[in-house]
Image: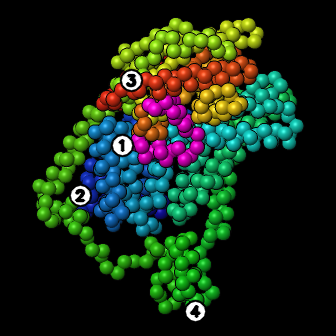
Amino acid sequence: MTSAEAIDRSHADRLFASSEPSLRWRWFWLALLGMCVPMLIPYLLGMWDFEHYQYFPFVFLAVGYLAYTRWDGVFRAPRGWIGWVLVALGITGIVASLLLPSAWLAGVAFVLLAVACLDAMSGPDDRRLVGVGLPLLMLIQLPVGLDRMLIIRLQNATTELSSVVLDIMTVPHAVSGNVIQLASRELFVAEACSGIQSVFTLAFLACVIVAWNRRRLWLTPLYLLIAIVLAVAGNVFRVTAIAAASAWWGADLASGWQHEMIGYLALGAAGLLLLSFDQLVITLLHPTAGGGPETADNPIIRGWNYLVAGWRYSGEETGYGYRPEADIAEDREPRQPWLEKLVLGRVGLGRPGWYALLGSAALITLGAVTQAMRVEVNRDPQPLIRADLLFDPSPGLLEGEYRVLAVDGHESTRDGAEPRLGQNADLWEFRARDPEGETLEGQLVVSQTYSGWHELCVCYENLNWDLIDREVCVTDPESMEVDQTGSYVTARFKRPDGQYGYLLFAAVNADGSFAEAPSSWGALGARFFSRLERHGVVNQQDLAMLQLWMVTPGKIEPEMLRDVQLDFMEIRDRVASAITDGAASPASPPVAAGSTQNDGEPE
């Protein structure tokens, strides 16, 4: 038998050798994690719909491999009160995911329980394996649209930095939103920065490096920050390479295998730079043994060694006295907390209580299976929709003279009769004539009543429109010739067939004031605390959403788009005045989330 075979057999023996307590703890952890699996499946299927989350299978591979190679094969109780708190939060999360239902909560619960399980494990070279679970955090899909906002912000930074680099390279270009206009074509930064080669993939690689090399967990935010910087740098490289190739040689590197190749080259280079940064960390943040035995108990040295390497002072008389924390043997068996005794059936509950715990886990798992079959795999659950009306628009509300719009053809739907338009909606067809004499057509829709801002960009993305850019515009009465201040959103979309979609939308509160459009990180806090779901609710105030949508075969000229924006703001003023004059009726109970669908464009 070779030495390698002996090592493998020894490792296998450790994994499959279990004492009675270890066997019971094995079933304890399997029961907890098994409760999450049914709802975890639709959650992961939903993650796969987003290209920037499609790295998640590698999360399971990385964590599984590290746990297998470092674990001593013994199942243990949750470690201390932190472990038991994680278990309690995980159980609460899975129960809440069944009551709502919410696959996202099930995903969070799985991560909490898996981290608690790894924290309870030990290995020959590791006192605990909690660091192995760090990549599991990348399974949590960022709530309240934070991931989309992060991507948009990074796209803005990429556009600005790419423009600077192209100026240095003397490549003629102009910047409009997240579009770089070259002499022969337009380059959409959203397309150049799309795919699995994103900031989230680099963040996952950073977590793997920390876990693989056993770095201190407090360094994780620093690694993630470097990952974000490298993601922007990689995207700048991709954009400038595509732009330079188009300007100098007329080559199209923005599609096909060439685009994928450049993306993976940028991802590989960023990964190597992450490894280089890791080497810099261990060069600067390394432990020290002190200058000699007389300085071994120096509190500064002791604190530094524990901070950067987890070294503790062993109290030995010889040498410098510093050893890794896992090498310091425990002089006595730790006292078993009463919770551990309770779960093992040695106190109070006994063996019937143990069976009751497993039976409860089985019932929750059965409920999870039932709910998972009912959960619709949808990227964004619906916001709360109220059945009442803030006001009842008259067919002639929007009639009149505008700069470029001619509005007619009013239709109204009530009580969810047309789910794609909302619970209660009023639609007006409009026509607009551009300077070249072509007639553009579209719809104006007032949908009500929502409990908080509804991010309509998500709805159109669900209809396979690619978002090019999203901009929050702030109204200035003096320059814009409108009655009120307030913000609204303009967004531009594109489809592979070359069609463009232009969307303008705003919200009007029940008192006739304008709801501010979310545009900053500060809005995310209000969004999170007001609603736990991921559907973009900023606050719970009742409001009506107003949107203008039109599809065009090509780009709209800036002057034409400016006139459309002015007309939209004038229409928004009319809607606000009508709501103010109409005196909203008493609020009715909200319609259950998901009872209607409003993820479609106006028909």
The correct choice, above or below, for 136 with respect to 508 in the image is below
Q: Please provide percent x and percent y for residue 576.
A: 51, 26
Q: Is residue 335 visible?
A: yes
The correct choice, above or below, for 261 with respect to 12 in the image is above
User: In this orientation, which residue lies closer to the viewer: 102 or 435?
Assistant: 435
**Cα gap from disc 1 to disc 3, whole angstroms:** 35 Å
The N terminus: image quadrant: bottom left
* Residue at the spot of label 1: 106
Tell me which label, 1 or 2, sits earlier in the chain: 2
**Cα gap from disc 3 to disc 4, whole angstroms:** 80 Å
Range drawn in magenta: 507-532
* Residue at the spot of label 2: 24
Compared across the picture, whether 389 is left or right of 453 comes to left
User: In this orientation, which residue lies closer to the viewer: 110 or 568?
Assistant: 568
**Cα gap from disc 1 to disc 4, whole angstroms:** 54 Å
Q: Mark 2 near mark 4, Cβ–Cβ under 8 Å?
A: no
Label 2 packing within 10 angstroms: few (<14), some (14-19), many (20+) = some
Q: Please provide percent x and percent y for residue 144.
A: 47, 40
**Cα gap from disc 1 to disc 2, whole angstroms:** 24 Å
Q: Please provide percent x and percent y for residue 398.
A: 54, 15
Q: Mark 3 near mark 4, Cβ–Cβ under 8 Å?
A: no
Please identify the quarter of the rendering in which residue 241 is found.
Answer: top right
Which amino acid does the dot numbered 2 rest on? Arg
